[in-house]
Amino acid sequence: MPRPAFILRSLTLLLTVMIGAGPSLAEKAALDWTQITSGPIGSSFGTIGAAWGDTDGDGDDDILLATEYHGIRLLRNDGADVFTDATPSVMNNTQTYRCVVLADYDNDGDLDAYGVRGAPNGANRLFRNDGGLGWADATTPPLDNTGDGACASWVDYDGDGILDIFLANTSNQSDRLFRGSGGGLFSNQTPSPMTLSRDAGGQAWCDFDDDGDQDLAQALGWDGLRLLRNDGGGVFTDVTTTQMAAIGDKTASVSWADYDNDLDFDLYVTVITAGEGGHNTLFHNDGGIFFESADPLLSPTGGYKDASWGDFDNDGDLDLYFVTNSGSDHLLHNNGDGTFVEDTPAVLDVAATSSNATACDYDLDGDLDIYLGTYPDRTNRLFRNDLSGDNHWFELVLVGTISNRSAIGARVTLTAGGLTQVREVTNCVGHLSQNPLAIHFGLGSATTIEGLTIRWPSGSVDHYDGLWTDMRYTITEDGLVPTYLEDYSVTARENGVELRWSLRDGSTDSPCFVFRRCDRSEQYVQLDLSSSSNGYMSWMAVDRDVVPGLSYQYRVETEGPSGNIVLFETAVIDIPACGFSLAQNSPNPFNPVTKINYSLDEPSLVKLVVYDIAGHRVRTLIDAVPAGVGRHSVTWDGTTDAGLIAPAGEYFYRLEAGLKCAVGRMLMVK
């Protein structure tokens, strides 16, 4: 493994899958999608909006659904494609919500939720996540708006480190900008361009002019599109172009993405009705000036409710998936030269009444999956991306300290393989939906991150180089902490799984802890396994309690300044299946103690007896004791059944397991 030449502000290495050299960036990896509809993840509930986020802090993203007549549903991600309905009582009701958005508004380390109900459904609600204590209704005025709300988003529009809420209303009612002042308090600070009555649809924030603050794009239904530039000091200027205002028909969703890797953000808009020339439109951003794309694949006429950008094939550019409320859905592959090609597999062409589409690496395997919410009562669908090929990836979770803790508004620029890409941490995207706060990059054949720059919402800028690919990092905005890990290896040996790792000189003298789970289908459990230093800052641990034929994954942690730090997490380790065998005792010759190892290929009653050279029984070590499949071990201390010390000489040991038997020879010396 290469040595990382970088400093991290805070390290959490969550998913480590090292992959070999890949194809060129232009080569298309093989996409394979698996549809998952079993359990609550496939239940519609009449899903109107959806939001991904790690609500329980276990490292993978859960999903909240805003539904008709079923309140807000919280589906907890338990791994292995299993989601459990963990809806707290405060959200579990027969009310209707149009949208729910997640962020850590109180900066306490867990994600909270704001739900938009819309007239005549009642007042909007703020739900505070109190971690292990559950969820509480923390709604205070003016967040209990009773207008005809369509959707909302969390944003730190003034860069003060405290999240604000933008609420878009429909039915020709004014939008609202609620400024957060800390302590759960908000005030109505709506500037004049937002008070104009509109028929709001989706919304998306992005620093499209790269001046350090968040600007707003809105789908306004029959009024087309609106673009508001944030000029600081609570001032927003309407910079909507003539083309945007005249997009035609009813706009439904807006989403920002740098599809052409020119380091500024472009805007994609969908329209939900057909007629009068209305069509989806990509507005190409050229240094703050927008031009309408002429690509016909990006401009289908009406009926499209939502669109989601994502590098689904990890080739280094963003692809586009958009869904319809009445026809065929489409996945467009980005060719990397500003053009797209239709690449929709049959499984993704659902032809259902889709309400939203979101992209999330819910299974932490390094590729983006898709969740499709349907309305009113169709089956929701989770599409697991089983991407094959050698393209690499990089994922990043940011934690603000001076900035808002969710780091909403942070801009990340990454260079790998000579290609530079940019992303922003954002909240609400598309149509009433939210992708996770984690950032994902596809890297193509690149095996090293040549440079990573983070511009935090506070304005501070951090630079890193030499980071590893095929990894998820967590970086915290809180001062320099040296990276601890130098390198590591993991090997499946005959006597178990051996883990070795080295730490950087002077990084820590704290103990290390080893955790294990079985094939990603379980929670990690700490092993009662000591890790020993076999050299200065070098460590080793051996897990001998493994079952042949099963698979395991390991994580090693050490103590950090404010809790445990994850040093590394291994790929899945397959333990080879074993047959029936009896190993040579060790040590041999011995005095007076030796160990005898044996393996079983089926559960058996086991008998193990030591004989002298004349065939007389000396010691029965195991007498018809049940034993399971796998490797086993027993120790002989050189004594007889009578408790006497056996004389020096040659001995035989005989193993019987069911109808099978084996014999070994050993030599005791004095």
Image (cartoon, grey):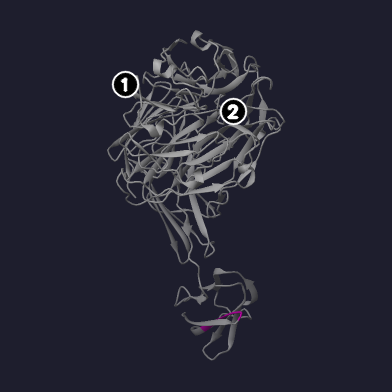
Residue at numbered disc 2 = 100
Whether residue 464 is visible here, answered yes or no, is: no
Relative to 476, residue 18 above or below:
below
Residue 420 drawn at (x, y percent): 31, 34
Q: Please, what is the dominant secondary structure of the magenta stretch?
A: strand
Secondary element under disc 2, as helix, strand or loop, is strand
> Which quadrant of the structure image shows residue 432?
top right
Q: Which residues are magenta?
A: 652-658
Choose the circle earlier in sequence order: 2 or 1: 2
Q: Position of residue 524 (x, y in %)?
A: 55, 49
Q: Is residue 228 magenta?
A: no
Q: Is residue 584 above or below residue 186?
A: below
Task: Tell me the kind of residue under disc 2.
Answer: Val
Q: Residue furthest bottom?
A: 614
Label disc, if present, on residue 287 of the rendered structure = 1
Seen at 42% across and 15% down, the residue is 240
Crowd tier of the residue under label 1, counting other residues whose Cα lies within 10 Å: few below 14, some 14–19, many 20 or above: few
